[in-house]
Image: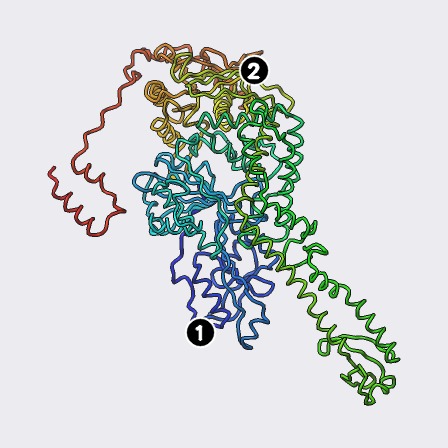
Amino acid sequence: MNAPLIHLPKADAVPSIEGTTPVMAQFLAAKASQPDAIVFFRMGDFYELFFKDAEIASAALGITLTKRGKHQGQDIPMAGVPVHALDGYLARLIRQGFKAAICEQLEAPSEARKRGSKAVVHRDIVRVVTPGTLTEDSLLDARGANRLAAVSVRKGRAAVAVVELSAGSVDAVACSLEDLGATLASFRPSEVLVPDRLFSDEATKAALDGCGGVVQALPQALAEPVGARVRVERLYGVASLDGFGAFEEAEVSALGLVAAYLETTQAGKIPALSPPRRANDSGFLAIDPATRLSLEIDRTQRGEREGSLLACIDRTVTSGGARALAERIARPLRDTTAINHGLDAVEWLLERRGLRRDLRDGLRASSDVARATSRLVLGRGGPRDLAAIRNGLSIAEGIAGLFPPARDPLTGPPARIVAALDRLALSPELGRLLVDLAEGLVAEPPHLARDGGFVSAGYRPELEEARRLRDDSRRVVADLEARAVAEAGVPFKIRHNAVLGYFLETSARAAEPLLRPSGDSPFIHRQTLANQVRFTTVELSELDAKISQAGHRALAIEGETFETWRRTVQSLAQPLQAVAEALAELDAHSALAEWAEEVGAVRPAVDDTACFEVTAGRHPVVEAAVKSAGDPYTPNDCRLDGSGAGCARLSIVTGPNMAGKSTFLRQNALLVVLAQAGAFVPARAMRLGVVDRLFSRVGAGDDLARGRSTFMAEMVETAAILTQATDRSFVVLDEIGRGTATYDGLAIAWAVAEALHDHNRARTLFATHYHELAGLETRLAHVCNLSMKAREWNGDLVFLHEAAPGAADRSYGVQVAKLAGVPAAVVARARAVLDRLEGEKRASVSLDDLPLFAMAEPPAPPPSSAVQDALAAIEPDELSPREALEALYRLKAIKP
């Protein structure tokens, strides 16, 4: 289920500014600009929160709620967090679904005082933090993408626009309304933007329920294509989007929602975004949210990464590579050529163990260039981000040198690796940036630019002078003191205070010769005290000014240097992102090769047939768990053919509980995911005709929040399979019909199996305890029986975990109950009842005699009326009020 929907509060939720202090008026103005966000208001070393924000934050973060002053006669609630601890508090708020607006001090108090003693430090919102717009390492999962998605529906077509702000990638996917849920789930967004009009559409609401992110409602006006196109063009700084491709209206609308949201949340800062990558609903294997959850592709059913397919195969050594691999597994391809190009890259690296080892060693030392670049462009980066870019560019040069320069088409790298290596070749501009950072940035820079100390010694002569004066002031002062004593013959001591700065001090008696008028004396009298007299010199006054300014000047020079580097990174954002993507892709390829070698995976033969042939296939996650416990894993074969020519199209899988039916079903579905993601598969051999949609109904679960029982949830998912599966799909079903009366369930299971065989014609594995379904093997042309073998030994049940031809004759439920620890008396009574039932004739009519199980042709849809046809041709969102009225009159004039 998706995270709670965020509703925008009403405008009157913000207190009135009348009768407030200047500072409180400043806060309320900031709050009015972001009424649906918790405003963190910078005051010195703390971020303060006031009014309702303070109450919410106090409850959500466990911080002290106090009060400060009054507003319209009422105490003002207040809470606060230290500046240095902000990230930790933000992370906790974001996880709870809140938005936060950061209102910063944009000038020093000394600058404000220049405008008058009562002037208030200028503050403004510099950023709105939401789940989908995070960029800080402390708030992000380094190995997982953090995506902001937007949904739009225009003229019966849906589109999803997705931006990963922390890495600068943008995707636009046009799809059918039926595929909206699967498309959204494949991106696993942290936040989803939706025009408020769509919340009245049941299909859209269902898609949002499975997306997993916080849903944010935006005004429908922001999704209008004309205005959306202008905002996207402004975001990219182009006069037209035609250079990026021919976008559908729905895609432009979705991209426009993203652009509008970024303009608001980034406070005018333009992020560095790659051109949108376009894809349609035929580009990727469609996996609906229920199937994704059932198969535990990237998250387990408990919502954890550990235990998922992704965690099992992940051997990446960089955070960017981990994200690239996660995207491949979450969005397997449907294009045979593209799949085989990915397999070519994995195979080539698998065959070259030494090169792969050197490549992974080099990548292991790399940094997250993409996220460092994004932070610098948005003005949130620091010297360590520059160090990450320096490190990444240096690693890129080294990795490019690992590969042979002569690229023989027969033995050289395949196309995907060649393309990645081409992106690693540094342009002259990137080369100059690398040289500048290598010469000018210290090896271990501080986190914040304002702390200074990150520019290398000798890089800027004026900085060295300022640093020398700042750091060597004691030696310089001591030298001047010694010269003053030698010149005057007086025991001077140089001292310092806030009023006089540096001065020469001596006793009253020793100062007498210097107090006599003398035109050529360099010593200038400053102050006489009871026992001391103080002097200065022109040189000491100049030194005083230089020393007091040296620290500020050194920081200013370093700040100027940092800003120069930051602007350079900003101008080179796209080539830097290309380097980051190339490093990530090489890491993903080499990681899949590493995993394939570890587990003995083989390259699948992927083609455009309707075949599914697996020899000695293994479930990757279960095998890893079984082997870690020191036990062997039993592989299994599976053969299906959608055409029915070579083997059955649908297999009925029977056998006792705990024998491995669900594992067998999931295993074959996961092999499809791996193969179409361009990965090798744990099997002796595999041939796969590309699958367009993958469906899995395995395991029981209710949806109480939506009023659905386990059986109802099962029927909803089954209905989706029957209406969407095609002859190119792959379906695994487990125990359909178990949540109702026996004959009701059997009837449903029988009818579903017939529909999948005759109408959908999908490759299907159908596990069941209704042994009567085994009769379908003789009734339908392309059905076979498989059973998970088990044996009884000395009264106990032994599972063989082996799938063999033929149907199971028993379910061994009583024996499984015994294994589960059901009391012996209950087991004995169950066995007695079972023996009696099995000994009686319980039906006088066989299933073959029941017309219920003859697959009926679906009834023809009723003919549409003229009114229905006219209504279907109307697009309400595109009508002006006058056009809508005219359409209403036309409808009224139609005769029934």
Residue that extends furthest to the bottom in the rendered view of this protein? 517
Query: Pointer 2: residues within 10 angstroms few (<14), some, or many (20+)?
Result: some
Nearest the eye: 356 or 207: 356
Say if 657 sits above or below 435 in the image. Answer: above
Q: Position of residue 538 (x, y in %)?
A: 75, 78
Say if 97 sits above or below 611 in the image. Answer: below
Nearest the eye: 15 or 591: 591
Say if 663 sits above or below 59 in the image. Answer: above
For label 1, the SS is: loop
Numbered label attached to residue 798: 2
Residue at horizontal 86%, vertical 77%? 485
Residue at horizontal 50%, vertical 21%? 664
Location of mark 1 (residue): 19
Q: Is residue 485 visible?
A: yes
Q: Earlier in the sequence, mark 2 or mark 1?
A: 1
* In the image: residue 800, left or right of residue 880: right
Q: Position of residue 288 (x, y in %)?
A: 42, 33
Q: Please count the marks in the image.
A: 2
What amino acid does circle 1 point to?
Answer: Gly
What amino acid does circle 2 point to?
Answer: Val
